[in-house]
Image (cartoon, helix red, strand yellow):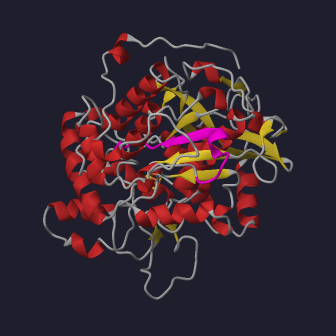
Amino acid sequence: MSRLLSVQESEAVKNVPKMVLASNVKVPETFDSKATYPFHYEVIGHDELPHVVKFSGGRSSGMMLFMLLENGFLKPKRGDVIVFNDTSAEHPETYNFTAKCKRIAEERYGIPFFWIQFQTYEDARGGKWVRLPTYRLVKPVPWSKDEPDGYHWKGEAFEELLSWSGYVPNQFQRTCTQNLKLEVTRQFLRDWFACKDSTGRLGHYGNGSRMDDDAMYAYHQKHRGKVPKEIFLDKKSYVRSRPVYRQQQSFSNFTQITQSIDNPHLAGKQFGGNAAFGDDGVEYATFVGLRYDEMRRVIKVQRRNSGGPEANGYEGEHVYMPLAKIGVTKEDVDEFWNNQSWGLNLPSEAGLSNCVYCFLKGARALRKVHKQMETTKEKKTSILDSPCDINWWKRMELRYGRDLEAEKRALQKKERAGAVIGFFGIDSGFSYDLLEKNGRGKVNISKFTKTVLPCDCTD
Ligand code: SF4
């Protein structure tokens, strides 16, 4: 990679005061792996591995990020990198907060911060044209014709996934977390840890989609798909309207930090031009902002760390959760941000982080989200029919939900005739419609609070 050893702080960043660490979350000034600290590496040598900070756009991961930065835990030469997976369904204030964190992390602390989004591209596989998943780097500005490298925020990447897969995620099949977040991060790291200057171009050179209706449908049927052709092709039309290729992108166009990576732990670990994971592959330390009061999620991630079936797909990754480790709770995170002169401009209790109407937030939280967003919608009409608007989620469910009756699938006793598998599954009894009905006091929403899980998306 080309070199730019120091980045000057812009006026905007110079005016941001140094972060104040709350008294109850003191971490050492300089790290010594032999000393005993509240937070320490679990295995000797992990401090030498490249570090990946998974930034979710929320307060907890923001606090973790600045604790790591302020304490000098991150080093660009080691290959350390901060990654934000943008689902294109985040709140506008999350985008503002993330853009500011990126700027400060790069200009003040010299650590590269990449913002990435899911996309697909068309290529030939096994003699036919197919769509394959990948990611693109985006700049911290909204997409427009003049800013084609900007981030999509009207649900484009999310809908591309639904159209590509042909169904909507639900609590049992979290295809959104898997594809929009986990997979794109791994793909990005394959490029980043290969120490390349740029990502490669992917896809054919045609002007439009080369996929053929009949061939696509025959493939669907061959794999026991039973969606009627008309519905199937309608679902696929959005993904086929998206770009057929992923252009080559230079990392230096998406970060201000271009210091060379010089880490012997990455040497000789490439295969076919990309970093390899698994046996003798790249190992890295990941930092996730799960807190002490989120123990169910912490334990789930810890299981991944200890090998076994949960570790499949995460080979080479060693997850650290410093907030959980040093006992940081939601109150501590709020105290941390209350001590700064800036932060995420969203009410702490409103549950607006991650995808705005995420189906995993739980009925009670979704009701709060809806109340907030209905007020915001009145003032900010640009968010109409974006993921900040409940109508977008209803439209996605209607178009991409699985209609079991149309598929002529045998329905279980408890499933209603004409049942559609939507964001809340088939028989939870909960739907986005209820949020609106409940607003008029017609439905008691509390009976649904146990039917959905809290969003796990920082995994
Ligand atoms: S926040 Fe919710 S909807 Fe968004 S990717 Fe995560 S699980 Fe899916």
The residue lying at 28 percent from left, 39 percent from top is 337
Question: What is the x, y in percent for residue 190?
Answer: 71, 40
Question: What is the x, y in percent for residue 67?
Answer: 42, 38
Question: What is the x, y in percent for residue 239?
Answer: 59, 44
Q: How many marks on residues?
A: 0
- Residue that lies at the very extreme toward the front in this rendered image: 35
Quarter location, residue 453: bottom left
Residue 305 appearing in the image: yes
Q: Which residues are magenta?
A: 42-59
**Side (left or right) of 37 relative to 78:** left
Camera-side residue of 437 and 51: 51
Question: What is the x, y in percent for residue 52?
Answer: 58, 40
**Compared to 419, does 34 lie above or below?**
above
The residue lying at 34 percent from left, 66 percent from top is 431
The residue lying at 65 percent from left, 26 percent from top is 77
Q: Is residue 44 magenta?
A: yes
Quarter location, residue 191: top right
**Side (left or right) of 139 relative to 245:** left
Q: Is residue 252 magenta?
A: no
Camera-side residue of 82 and 215: 82
